[in-house]
Image (cartoon, rainbow, N blue to C red):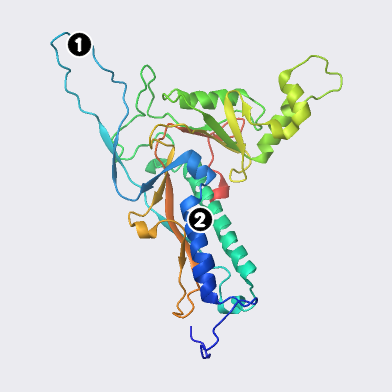
Amino acid sequence: MSFNHVFTDGFYTSDNVDWNDVWLGELAPSLDMYNNEEGLDFRALLTSDSDDTLKNINIPNSSMFGRMGEISTPDAKQIKRGKWHAVTDEFGGAYGYTFTSLKDMDLSAIRDTQAMMFDMDRKTMRFEIVKSIMINNGATAECLWNGSFSTLENITVPPPQLANTFAAAHTHYVVSGATTFTDLTFITTAAAHIREHGYEGRIVCFFNIAQEKEVVDYLSITSTSVVVANPITNVMGAEGIDWVGRLNGVDFVRTAAMPASYCLFAGVDTPGNNTLAKFVQSHNTSYRGLILMRGSNPDYPIIESYYLRWFGSKVYNRSLGVAGYLAASGSYVNPTYYDV
């Protein structure tokens, strides 16, 4: 882009702040703070960080230490290993900092624009993380247990957990058995689906406001003639929708990132980095985080600047989640919300 302008006084915001002072004193430090301190909810709960290089992973098994005599040594055994790999995609937004739009923007408007970019970045990460778990992608097996296995995994059935063994067709993409969330046995069934793989920690269910309303309506007092004290209906009658936080041993989180008629149960207390999914960034560290790319004008990099992030999300521990579809019967159907 070229400009018929002699750079004597320079360019300013509408409240007389030099554009380069905005770039160096506002946008750059604010972006650094965001990248260093931002703790996205879903990223913290469901993922740990990884990069796009091929990883070797140990395959869990049911082996235990053997009983030994006084002078014996243990038999040599080799841990079976598989591989795991994920890639990054490029996401970006070019909003707000055109030469024309900057003409009418004061410093506050530029700050608000970057704040909006931060919010869009969070929404994008949240969307991609949940999408990577909720979509049953069939034979590629880059998802929860679904009856398929990649060659990198080096397994043909889910690994056993002591006395619990699993068939090759074992799946964590399930149908609830009812069109509403009022069949509360589905909660314990989904939790058991995770715990049978050896997980003992906290389980969180992510669901839409529509399903939260179904649970609240189902458990609320339905008649003024109710005379038998019940701790659930008592609290529900007093607190209503704000009470729904824990039910049948599962914590619930309402989120617009989950489409109606779907839910995700996830184990969120995992040792080390053995999380449900991985948040994948480039092995080139200069490509990590949210990036504000300079515009083409060397005197004012804010002009035509735009935001980029390279990242991906992929299921890592296939046992730690259950994707639920609220239907009376049939098979799991991928939510169309993620068809973008």
In the rendered structure, which disc, 1 or 2, sits on the residue that comes first in sequence? 2
Instruction: Please name the residue shown 62% across and 30% down the image.
Output: 328
Rendered location of residue 159, percent (x, y): 34, 27
Give above or below for 239 relative to 93: above
- Give the residue at mark 1: 68
- Secondary structure under the numbered disc 1 in the rendered image: loop
Decide if residue 326 is in sight here. Answer: no
Q: Is residue 254 rendered to the left or right of residue 290? A: right
Q: Residues within 10 Å of mark 1 (few under 14, many from 20)?
A: few
Q: Residue flagged by tag 1: what amino acid is it? A: Met
Give above or below for 27 relative to 281: below
Instruction: Please name the residue shown 54% across and 52% down the image.
Output: 122
In the image as oriented, which residue stretches furthest toward the left?
71
Rendered location of residue 283, percent (x, y): 33, 54
Q: Nearer the viewer, residue 70 or 263?
A: 70
Instruction: Please name the residue shown 17% across and 17% down the image.
Output: 74
Q: Residue flagged by tag 2: what amino acid is it? A: Tyr
In the image as oriented, which residue stretches furthest toward the right?
225
Instruction: Please name the residue shown 28% across and 18% down the image.
Output: 64
Label 1, label 2: how far apart the Cα atoms are: 55 Å
Q: Which mark is residue 34?
A: 2
Rendered location of residue 225, percent (x, y): 86, 19
